Amino acid sequence: MAETKNLTEYYIQADPIIIPDSFEGYPLRYFNLPLHYRDDLNYVLIPYGLVQDRIEALASRIFHDLTINIPEQLICICVLKGGYRFFSDLISKIQNENRLQNNRSLPMSLEFIRTRSYINDYSSNQLEIIGLSDLNNLKNRNLLIIEDIIDTGITMVALKEQLEKFQPKTIQVVSLFTKRRKDKQCIFKPDYCGFEIPDHFIVGYALDYNEYFRDLEHICILKESGVAKYKINDNNI
Ligand code: HPA
Ligand code: MG
């Protein structure tokens, strides 16, 4: 009996998968990759299938946690554009739980916002939030912010501050990735996280580099030639 309990706890565990600095990734030849990006990539850091598996575990965990504490409708906020695939897959996996579990249920509504803080592959302190003006219905509601990656943490701290102005009852954050930065520590820890990754710039699964590579399934690391090819020249902006 004790064994069964351990298995259940293991299945819905909340801890992120930690990818160590020493991990060298998977060779490109193992994967189906779009021809238009094949020469720009160095290696696959996280295959699409593993991302899906991890999202399933996150969905299960969130479903179990929030149906205990928050039986009301949850407002799920998608941070576009990078979060759109994670949002879509996470919501559909929570919907699966809603269909399959007979003794619990998590009603959801869906909102979409945009933030902008990146030019090329470095973090800037500038943050612009778009789409917040008509979110007055957040008062006394439970929010779940669904984000692709927490890197410096600056964006999420600013976003949470802005959302708090609408006086929600709770704000929780789920991020598919957090980055272990070498220079300074990330200033924000999400409530739920899929993977903790080394200090690399990642692309794929809707995460972009200057609007390229969103249309790639796997999470990949670029070659230097790929970084150079799609770089926005600072003189042009
Ligand atoms: N990749 C893409 N977008 C990002 C990253 C990253 O590593 N960090 C913050 N935004
Ligand atoms: Mg993002």
Image (tube, helix red, strand yellow):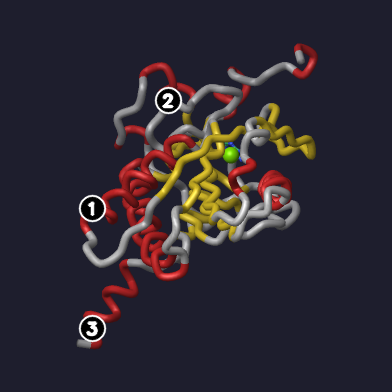
| Residue highlighted by disc 3 | 3
**Sequence-first tag of 3 and 2:** 3
Judged left or right of residue 227, residue 158 is right
The residue type indicated by label 3 comes to: Glu
Q: Is residue 130 above or below residue 1?
A: above
Spatial CA span between label 1 and label 2: 30 Å
In this view, the residue farthest toward the bottom is: 2
Q: Is residue 26 above or below residue 53?
A: above
Q: Give the crowd class for mark 1: few <14, some 14-19, many >=20 residues within 10 Å.
A: few
| Residue highlighted by disc 2 | 215
Residue displayed at 68% across by 18% down: 232
Q: Give the crowd class for mark 3: few <14, some 14-19, many >=20 residues within 10 Å.
A: few
State the image quarter where residue 8 is shown: bottom left
- Residue 178 placement (x, y as % from top left): 57, 52
Residue displayed at 47% across by 53% down: 74
**Sequence-first tag of 1 and 2:** 1
In this view, the residue farthest toward the top is: 236
